[in-house]
Image (cartoon, helix red, strand yellow):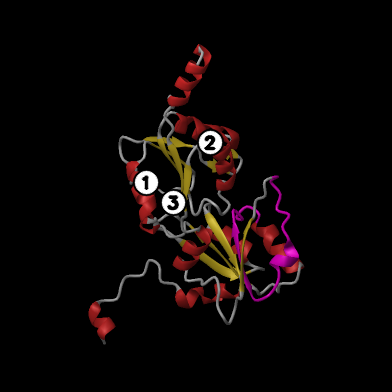
């Protein structure tokens, strides 16, 4: 065995420290909606790379020793380009750190989680995915709006109101079908166009629709209306992001099923 072979064998035995990246869904905001695994990974991590929609209550679970890196995105205001975020995750893991990549909702639903994992896989960085309660499910639940219902909705679609190219050019005929629920992420700015297009493609102006602001958090507000008057009602209420838009007959159940924020009934009332 020559010296070159000896040196190659030595290099093969020397391993640089490689950490891990956990892609974690933070849920819709309320920290009590985190999964147990998400909470444990947050408590044990070396660094958290987190997004704009991660609530303060969730961040409060991050230990004091852990580094926090904000990479959030708001409309037309990105703190860090996506390619730099991808490389940051690789670099941190190659430093031997246990990284939690924390995203609001579920990381595989409009969270760019798949894009980030593709880069990690190509770089040979170990990773795992911890699902979170997506905004559609969590916020609809606290708003008292069932996403499916045998009398009202046999389909449920999740769509984004803000495409990668900045347009709002969606598959309107598919979204305007009856007896389904459509949940629109990032649709507040384009709400007037969304409502107009749904009406133009066949839904009646009286079709129920609603917008939920700060879903699952204290101060949650719900504006339930019709496609025809929802944009004006939302503007009058002054709703601001983060908001979720829900379109479908199930929105009409909100008034009856709304429960969030109500005081619990005393035990004697329940026993009566």
Horizontal arrangement in the rendering, residue 131 relative to residue 200 (left or right) = left
Q: How far apart, in angstroms, are the residues tagged by discs 2 and 1?
A: 21 Å
> Which one is closest to the eye, mark 2 or mark 1?
2
- What residue is shown at x 39% (from left), y 58% (from top)? 33
The dot on residue 26 is 3
Which is more foreground, mark 3 or mark 2?
2
Was residue 178 drawn as part of the magenta stretch in this picture? yes
Dot 1: within a 10 Å radius of its alpha carbon, few (fewer than 14), some, or many (20 or more) residues?
Answer: some
Residue 82 percent coordinates (x, y): 58, 37
Residue closer to the observer: 258 or 11: 11
Q: Which residue is labeled 1 in the image?
A: 41
**Left or right: where 272 falls relative to 131:** left
Q: Is 167 included in the stretch rendered in magenta?
A: yes
Viewer-proximal residue among 255 and 177? 177
Whether residue 200 is visible, yes or no, is yes
Total number of numbered discs in the rendering: 3
- For label 2, the residue is 124
Q: As drawn, is 187 to the left or to the right of 43?
A: right
Name the foreground residue: 86 vs 32. 86
């Amino acid at each position: 065995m020559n010296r070159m072979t000896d040196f190659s064998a030595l290099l093969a035995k020397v391993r640089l420290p490689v950490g891990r990246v956990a892609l974690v869904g933070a849920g819709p905001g309320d920290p009590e909606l985190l999964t147990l695994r998400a909470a444990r990974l947050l408590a044990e991590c070396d660094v958290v790379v987190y997004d704009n929609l991660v609530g303060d209550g969730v961040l409060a679970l991050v230990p004091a020793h852990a580094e926090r890196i904000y990479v959030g995105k708001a409309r037309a205001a990105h703190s860090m380009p996506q390619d730099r975020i991808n490389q940051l995750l690789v670099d941190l893991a190659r430093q031997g750190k246990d990284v939690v990549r924390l995203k609001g909702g579920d990381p595989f639903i409009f969270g760019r989680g798949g894009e980030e994992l593709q880069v990690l896989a190509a770089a040979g960085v170990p990773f795992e995915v911890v699902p979170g309660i997506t905004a559609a499910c969590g916020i609809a639940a606290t708003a008292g709006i069932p996403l499916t219902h045998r009398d009202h909705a046999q389909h449920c679609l999740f769509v984004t109101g803000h495409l990668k190219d900045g347009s709002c050019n969606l598959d309107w005929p598919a979204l305007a079908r009856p007896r389904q629920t459509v949940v629109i992420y990032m649709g507040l700015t384009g709400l007037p166009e969304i409502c107009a297009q749904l009406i133009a493609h066949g839904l009646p102006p009286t079709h129920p629709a609603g917008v939920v602001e700060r879903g699952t958090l204290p101060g949650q507000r719900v504006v339930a209306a019709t496609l025809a008057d929802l944009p004006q009602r939302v503007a009058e209420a002054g709703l601001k992001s983060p908001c979720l838009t829900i379109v479908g007959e199930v929105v009409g159940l909100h008034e009856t099923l709304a429960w969030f924020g109500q005081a619990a009934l005393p035990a004697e009332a329940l026993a009566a």
